[in-house]
Image: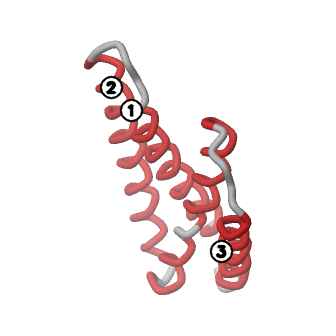
Amino acid sequence: MNILLIILASLFSCAGQLCQKQATTVSGGRRPLLLWLGGSVLLLGMAMLVWLRVLQTVPVGVAYPMLSLNFIFVTLAARWLWRETLSLRHALGVILIVAGVAIMGSYT
């Protein structure tokens, strides 16, 4: 259950960050910008609430490194949504993060 909550917190956080990125690309006035930023605040707030639940049951020294999942989710989403390039160095970094999360995840 703990790992699912950590993943959920990361997904909400990732979605909020993606909304921020999208806010930087919109045109057409203030309304679209405010909608994307409002979505970001809402999603990041939800991430915080889930994260607080995680911290009730998982030691912070174990839980916090798990937020590295954000790097993975944001990288994959940016590649898919905006066709951002993924260098070999970046890909290797993501692989190392996955390995670290897997090692840390064995604790929860």
Q: Secondary structure at mark 3?
A: helix
Q: Secondary structure at mark 2?
A: helix
Please indicate whether residue 58 sits to the left or right of residue 91 in the image.
left
- Residue drawn at x 45%, y 33% is 22
Identify the residue under disc 3. 97
> CB of mark 1 within 8 Å of CB of mark 3?
no
Amino acid marked by disc 3: Ile
| Precedes in sequence: disc 2 or disc 1 | 1
Amino acid marked by disc 1: Ala
Q: Quadrant of residue 36?
A: top left
Identify the residue under disc 2. 33
Q: Secondary structure at mark 1?
A: helix
Viewer-proximal residue among 63 and 86: 86
Viewer-proximal residue among 99 and 7: 99
> CB of mark 3 within 8 Å of CB of mark 2?
no
Marks 1 and 3, how far apart at CA: 27 Å
Marks 2 and 1, how far apart at CA: 5 Å
| Precedes in sequence: disc 3 or disc 2 | 2
Amino acid marked by disc 2: Leu
Per the rendering, the mark at residue 23 is: 1
- Residue drawn at x 64%, y 80% is 108
